[in-house]
């Protein structure tokens, strides 16, 4: 891939990753992207889930420009200082892009490595699993890992598998976000845990992975996601619990990046 | 154990040319290339389209080599997948290129072969590798249509000299009437299984059109259709042309249907696809049942084609056009582009009458300019 790249390295490249599906990688990616956008950064958001992209659903309420093709490259959509690219914006929803081998590399070139992402922070929303696509990206582009998990043991086990993959590529891990961790009771302001799994930092291969932050299961966030408006899109939520959590995560990311 | 046997109709490559085959094509042709990528998205009017969606009959690939060169690989579709045809097609493309017709340049192997052969479940398949041409697709403008007409005239001239040069027994002969007949059979067959509730409508349509075809055929043969034969492109429509930003034709592509036939068939197909049938966006499928025939543009295109040329036997054009329109409609029915068969009866009559008017106008114009 290095032979073909026009890639301009962003100051910070963050892989949002988990071995498990459905833990909220895309939601976290989108909201972190909008957090940095609100803070005045130029942000890139790449939906690396080429076959089953979810970001288009999460941002369908935001007025992005269309993705178009310039020569061989698929240019990202734009909203203010945010560039974003997803296969979900191309063709029909049912266009399953079953891509492997040289076609997968070709797709990554056309959507990602061939593009000059002129941004400060590039967020890559990884698909679940440990596939060819992961190795293609981790091998070709060094970045920092932000794990997303839920405190359920099924999710935690896959997280350890993901950590083993990351170890092979010798990438820096910023930390773990524990998503869908609890609900804030509207009556008593108590936090009610949703899973009875371990809410702990963990070690793998003598390396410790710490929980950066636990995020609540926020009904408003869930509703906004379903209508395509990212929670962090609206700057007027400043005093909300979840908003503050995302601001905290953003600052931890800036600190944790090597 | 029987459950482990692969079902033949499932294509595990999902319409893509497998990596190993592309590697063979690349390694046989480019010495210094070590790495390459297959680009799955193609640029159609600045929209990204999956390469498998663009074409249903032939697998294609766009390859980016590590010297930044782009090449286009194309597999010959099943209906022309033979050694005889691939040799004919590559020879024809080289001849056209030599005589300054804009066609993609073929890239030969080290053994000076212009195709790569492989075995697929006992059948031979053929791939050709050619330069990739940057351009845009048809934007539905008048200037493109007139350029297509002028380019067809140029192409036909060179095809005439190719026809005089070659061994005619090596090229298959086609006939518009027989093709339309066959396509009607295909449309009936494909709908019988998948569109059962409309079978009666379709059978009525089928019978009527078989009858009409015979009437058109009588007129066509009387006008000398079978006497003046040459080489034709066979699929001269806007999606087989690559245009520049300024609407010039950069290349004519897809000679898979090239055969010995009357060249008026190319003219008729060009007019029908530029001035009558409507395409779905970015595909070769038709969108709606065509109703309005752009007679003004068609007349201009035909004048452009014949300008300064002796016109002979153009009386055959209306009946030929009606026959070709029946073939195109049958093709559309076979791939389920249209649903209501009752709307289709008048298409060939509209075509026939429109072409009558066009031909009259063209003849009048020619007589005037002769004085």
Image (cartoon, coloured by chain):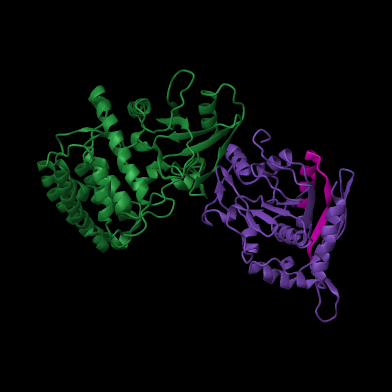
Rendered purple, the chain in question is A
Decide: is B241 above or below B163: below
Q: Is residue A182 visible?
A: no
Q: Is residue A86 visible?
A: yes
- Residue B343: x percent and y percent? 26, 63
Decide: is B31 above or below B201: above
Q: Which residue appears farthest toward the bottom when viewing the image?
A: A187
Task: Give the image quarter of residue A246.
Answer: bottom right
Residues B243 and A185: in front is: B243
Residues B230 and B371: in front is: B371
- Residue A144: x percent and y percent? 80, 47
Q: Is residue B211 magenta?
A: no
Q: Is residue B13 left or right of residue A237?
A: left
Q: Is residue A159 magenta?
A: yes
Residues shaded magenta: A157-181
Rendered green, the chain in question is B
Task: Give the image quarter of residue B172.
Answer: top left
- Residue A134: x percent and y percent? 70, 44
């Amino acid at each position: 891939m290095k032979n073909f790249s026009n890639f301009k390295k962003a100051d910070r490249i963050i892989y949002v990753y988990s071995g498990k599906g459905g833990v909220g990688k895309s939601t976290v990616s989108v909201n972190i992207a909008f957090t940095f956008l609100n803070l005045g950064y130029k942000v890139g958001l790449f939906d690396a889930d080429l076959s089953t992209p979810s970001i288009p659903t999460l941002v369908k309420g935001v007025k992005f420009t269309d993705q178009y093709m310039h020569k061989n490259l698929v240019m990202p959509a734009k909203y203010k200082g945010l560039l974003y690219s997803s296969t979900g914006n191309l063709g029909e929803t049912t266009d399953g892009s079953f891509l492997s081998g040289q076609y997968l590399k070709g797709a990554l070139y056309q959507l990602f490595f061939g593009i000059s992402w002129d941004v400060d922070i590039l967020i890559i929303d990884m698909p679940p699993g440990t596939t060819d696509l992961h190795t293609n990206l981790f091998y070709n582009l060094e970045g920092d890992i932000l794990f997303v998990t839920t405190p359920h043991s099924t999710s935690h086990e896959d997280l350890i598998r993901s950590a083993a993959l990351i170890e092979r590529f010798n990438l820096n891990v910023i930390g773990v976000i524990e998503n869908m961790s609890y609900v804030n009771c509207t009556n008593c302001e108590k936090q009610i845990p949703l899973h009875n799994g371990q809410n702990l930092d963990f070690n793998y291969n003598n390396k410790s992975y710490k929980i950066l932050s636990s995020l609540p299961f926020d009904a408003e966030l869930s509703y906004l996601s379903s209508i395509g408006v990212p929670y962090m899109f609206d700057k007027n939520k400043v005093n909300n619990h979840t908003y503050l959590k995302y601001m905290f995560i953003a600052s931890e990311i800036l600190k944790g990046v090597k | 154990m029987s459950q482990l046997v692969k079902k033949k109709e499932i294509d595990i490559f999902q319409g893509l040319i497998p990596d190993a085959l592309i590697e063979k094509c690349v390694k046989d042709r480019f010495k210094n290339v070590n790495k390459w990528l297959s680009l799955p998205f193609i640029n159609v009017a600045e929209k990204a389209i999956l390469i498998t969606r663009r074409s249903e009959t032939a697998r294609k690939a766009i390859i980016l080599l590590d010297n930044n060169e782009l090449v286009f690989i194309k597999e010959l579709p099943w209906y022309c997948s033979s050694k005889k045809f691939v040799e004919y097609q590559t020879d024809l493309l080289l001849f056209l290129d030599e005589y300054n017709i804009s066609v993609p340049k073929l890239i030969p192997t080290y053994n000076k072969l212009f195709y790569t052969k492989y075995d697929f479940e006992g059948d031979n398949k053929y791939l050709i590798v050619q330069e990739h041409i940057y351009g845009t697709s048809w934007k539905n403008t008048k200037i493109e249509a007139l350029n297509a007409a002028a380019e067809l005239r140029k192409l036909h001239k060179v095809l005439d000299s190719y026809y005089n040069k070659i061994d005619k027994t090596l090229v298959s002969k086609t006939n518009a009437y027989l093709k339309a007949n066959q396509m009607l059979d295909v449309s009936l067959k494909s709908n019988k299984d998948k569109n059962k509730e409309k079978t009666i409508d379709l059978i009525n349509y089928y019978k009527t059109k078989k009858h009409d075809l015979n009437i058109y055929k009588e007129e066509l043969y009387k006008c000398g259709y079978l006497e003046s034969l040459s080489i034709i492109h066979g699929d001269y429509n806007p999606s087989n042309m690559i245009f520049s930003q300024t609407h010039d034709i950069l290349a004519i592509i897809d000679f898979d249907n090239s055969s010995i036939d009357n060249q008026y068939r190319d003219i008729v197909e060009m007019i029908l696809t530029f001035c009558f049938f409507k395409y779905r966006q970015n595909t070769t499928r038709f969108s709606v049942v065509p109703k309005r025939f752009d007679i003004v543009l068609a007349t201009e295109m035909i004048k452009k084609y014949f300008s300064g040329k002796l016109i002979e036997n153009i009386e055959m054009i209306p009946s030929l056009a009606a026959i070709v329109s029946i073939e195109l409609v049958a093709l559309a029915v076979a791939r389920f582009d249209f649903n209501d068969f009752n709307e289709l009866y008048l298409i060939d009559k509209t075509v026939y009458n429109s072409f009558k008017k066009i031909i009259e106008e063209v003849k009048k114009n020619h007589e005037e300019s002769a004085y």
